[in-house]
Amino acid sequence: MMRSLLLALSRRLWVRDAMVRLPVTGSVVRRFVAGETVAEALPVIAGLVAKGLTVTVDHLGEDTVVAAQADATAAAYLDLLRTIEAHDLAGSVEVSLKLSALGQFLPVYGEETALRNARTICAEAARIGTTVTIDMEDHTTIDSTLGLVDQLRADHPWVGAVLQSSLRRTVNDCRRLAYPGSRIRLCKGAYASPPEVAFDSPQQVSLSYVRCLRALLDGDAYPMAATHDPRLIEIWERLVADREPGTYEFQMLYGIRPLEQERLAALGHTVRVYVPYGTDWYGYFIRRLAERPANLAFFLRSLVGRG
């Protein structure tokens, strides 16, 4: 019930405005968000790479409804990629982006705008020698997003896609997309979905996660298991025990289980940390609180401690 409430609040602007005004919020958000600017995020990114980790960087934003804002987001990604290049980080750092931030659901020419912006970003990523992963959003966006990924892959086969094991359709999406070289990030999913499209218990979501991992491995994709769940991490370690390093990834979020990230990297696994930055942090932050009770408890303790 608490998770559903938090996910509902993630789209309430009045709650966002109230949280932004809380003095404690900024310090707690910095646990999960690397800063508001590229300059603030850069030391975090470089520090993770220095520890033997790889990184995917997200310029926060979603649900863009103005074409100029979508173009501004694309420009921000170009600036991010040039910063990555300037600091010689392209070998370890890629970017993640949401198509809704690039104009996907503009009332006029939404998909065309998002595709144009995404192609520009992918071309710049190719130029500097890195990759792009297209984030997945709520269940209503899946067909549009995967359709645009297919178009992007025509020119850039390395474009990554994201699938969510909480959704009933996902194992079939995994089978379709599990062709050689297909980069697929599998996560549980952090969006509220109705029961007819999503599993309604954590156990079912975890079982679906394992089925999806197996489907990706059976099809010889490049699977990227994004989870902090100790049991699923253990299962993933067993499933990839005979695979060559560099043919799969572990992925985790910045600020969550950093010691586990370093442990896995020390064993020779590729571990990629999802690092968000930007001023539009509210929706991302609330979804992180909804995902794990420990995150919510941390936030509430901070409120009490500062109160």
Image: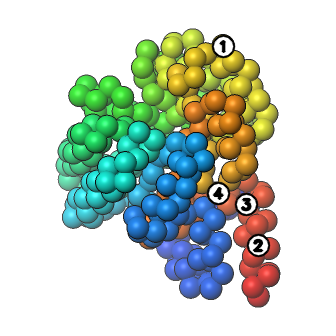
Which amino acid, mark 1?
Asp
Up-down: is 110 above or below 151?
A: below
- Mark-to-mark CA distance, 1 and 4: 30 Å
| Circle 4 residues within 10 Å: few <14, some 14–19, many ≥20 | some
Q: Quick check: marks 3 and 1 in contact, CB under 8 Å?
A: no
Residue drawn 60% across and 61% down? 32
Up-down: is 258 above or below 265?
A: below
Q: Quick check: marks 2 and 1 in contact, CB under 8 Å?
A: no
Q: Nearer the viewer, mark 3 or mark 1?
A: 1
Residue in front for this viewpoint, 89 or 15? 89
Return the residue at label 2. 300
Q: Nearer the viewer, mark 3 or mark 4?
A: 4
- Circle 1: element type: loop
The reply, left or right, for residue 167 in relation to residue 68 is right
Q: Nearer the viewer, mark 2 or mark 4?
A: 4
The reply, left or right, for residue 42 in relation to residue 165 is left
Mark with earlier residue (2, 4): 4
Mark with earlier residue (3, 1): 1
- Mark-to-mark CA distance, 2 and 3: 9 Å
Q: Nearer the viewer, mark 2 or mark 1?
A: 1
Say whether residue 11 is visible: no
- Circle 3: element type: helix
| Circle 1 residues within 10 Å: few <14, some 14–19, many ≥20 | few
Which amino acid, mark 2?
Leu
Return the residue at label 1. 242
Residue 255 circle label:
4
Residue 279 figure quarter: bottom left
Return the residue at label 3. 295
- In which quadrant will I find the N terminus? bottom right
- Mark-to-mark CA distance, 3 and 1: 34 Å
- Mark-to-mark CA distance, 2 and 4: 17 Å
Mark with earlier residue (2, 1): 1
